[in-house]
Image (tube, helix red, strand yellow):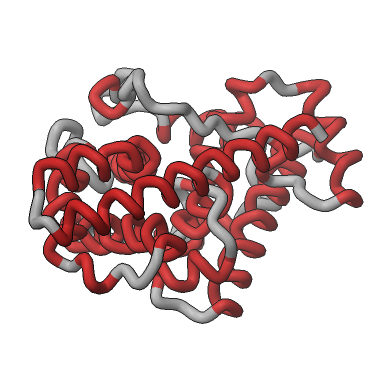
Amino acid sequence: MEKEINKQTNQGTIQWEVKETYSKLVDFRKKDNRQSFNNELLRLMPQVKNYVAKRLRTAILSGKLNKGMFSPNDFTDQLFIEVYDNWDSIRNESYLRPYLFKKVDELLDDSLTEEEFDHVFFENIDTFSQPEWDTMEEDFSTDGDGDLVMLEELDDKSLIKDNYTLNHVFVSDDEKELAEKLDRSLDKERVERHIQMVLGKMSLPMRSVFQLATDQGFTLNEIASIKDATLDEVDDLLTKARRLLKDSFVKRFLVDSN
């Protein structure tokens, strides 16, 4: 209950910030005041920057991107230009925040090679032994030389961290018992590492839909707009992502796989 109240409070704060920012942006754009426009838009950038950092981090940990090749600023800096130059595309205040994520998604997709869906992982999820699970997690958290990937360059201390919890995976009432069992045996860091590892095995569309819904609180309709997808497609991706995560927790931690 407390988590849901906090989530609603955070969403209310974001909506208020967007409304206030949009009004000022309209005025600055009419006056062709780019500097003031960018300064005001900056208020909304921490959320976008955090989303970019997570996508870059996953690409690095999955071995699809070298460390240091990009930073979140590479994409958010370009986003300022995109928003100013295409301001007429933002029809009203409710479209502003989805538009930011839609454009930054496009910028990311143009620069990053889409990761392939790891079919082998999910086809064999019932057969992995505990040592195999541990090895997968270790491989996901290390670079080619076996050193832990800390990725400090993507950890902006000014950003609010969206750490994953069991509540992001086990969302229905009939799943509470499973979540409680896992909560008794796993600490927060272990849960976070496992979720990050499994997300890295997903297709990019599935993972990003999960992140937009979980980290950013977008509705299915908003995500469909961001992704140029249908509502059914987005709903299907989010459902599959949560099911894969749930199954992985059950198979790894609640079933004797040894």
Side of 235 relative to 76 (left or right)? right
In this view, 256 is above or below 200: above
Is residue 18 visible in this depiction of the protein? yes
Which residue lies at the image location 9% right of the left edge and 49% below the top edge?
Answer: 34
Report whether 233 appears left or right of 174.
Answer: left
- Is 64 situated above or below 160? below
In this orientation, which residue lies closer to the viewer: 215 or 59?
215
Q: Position of residue 218 (x, y in %)?
A: 54, 56
How many labels were placed on the picture?
0
Q: Camera-side residue: 130 or 220?
A: 220
Residue 130, image quadrant: top right
Quadrant in the rendering for residue 60: top left
Q: Quadrant for the C terminus, please.
A: top right
**Residue 181, position in %: x, y?**
86, 31
* Residue at 44% in and 56% down: 208
Quadrant containing the N terminus in the rendered view: top right
Residue 123 in the image: state x and y as whole percent: 59, 61
Classify residue 174 as left or right of residue 158. Answer: right
Looking at the image, is 257 positioned above or below residue 146?
below
Can residue 57 be seen?
no
> 14 or 128: nearer the eye?
14
Q: Is residue 142 left or right of residue 86?
A: right
Q: Where is residue 63 in the image (x, y as percent from the top left)?
A: 28, 42
Residue plotted at (44% across, 42% down): 17
Q: Residue at x 34, y 35 (%)?
A: 46
